[in-house]
Image (cartoon, rainbow, N blue to C red):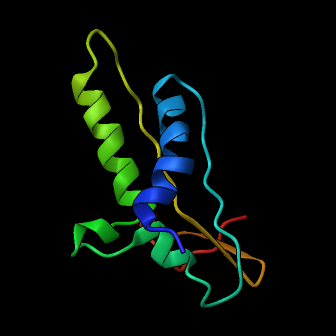
Amino acid sequence: EHSTEHIYNEIAYPLVEGLMEGYNGTIFAYGQTGSGKSFTMQGVVDPSSQKGIIPRAFEHIFESIQCAENAKFLLRASYLEIYNEDVRDLLGADTKQKLE
């Protein structure tokens, strides 16, 4: 019943703020097929009100980095899919390669 913006502000925003302070963070989307996990995480580009958690988090992270002074950042991101006990990194070079 909530918009992706509301979900981001309530759940992901504090997590991203923690990332900017040096903590690790994970968002775990779990549920049956067709329950809206991919839409919540990815959303759609247009209208911008339906952007998902991932694009909102990336905007938040890069805006924070841009505003930071006297700091260095190392950013690593993975987008893991676990399906039928197979794990894949959807941001990797070969998205069909299974991980251990």
Taking the image as shown, residue 77 lies to the left or right of residue 43, namely right
Residue in the picture at 22% in, 74% down = 47
Q: The N terminus appears in which quarter of the rendering?
A: bottom right
Residue 90 visible (yes or no):
no
Farthest residue, direction front? 1
Residue in the picture at 40% in, 65% down = 52
* Residue 98 position in % (x across, y down): 64, 74
* Residue 99 position in % (x across, y down): 66, 66
* Residue 11 position in % (x across, y down): 57, 49
Rendered image quadrant of residue 31: bottom right
Taking the image as shown, residue 92 lies to the left or right of residue 98, namely left
Residue in the picture at 54% in, 49% down = 10
Rendered image quadrant of residue 48: bottom left
Please say if 21 is above or below 69.
below
Taking the image as shown, residue 53 lies to the left or right of residue 61, namely right
Farthest residue, direction bottom? 34
Taking the image as shown, residue 89 lies to the left or right of residue 91, namely right
Q: Nearer the viewer, residue 61 or 4?
A: 4
Q: The C terminus appears in which quarter of the rendering?
A: bottom right
Farthest residue, direction right? 85
Please say if 62 is above or below 100.
above
Farthest residue, direction top? 70
Residue in the picture at 44% in, 65% down = 4
* Residue 16 position in % (x across, y down): 48, 39
Residue 58 visible (yes or no):
yes
Q: Nearer the viewer, residue 36 or 75?
A: 36
Please say if 63 is above or below 41.
above
Q: Nearer the viewer, residue 61 or 12?
A: 12
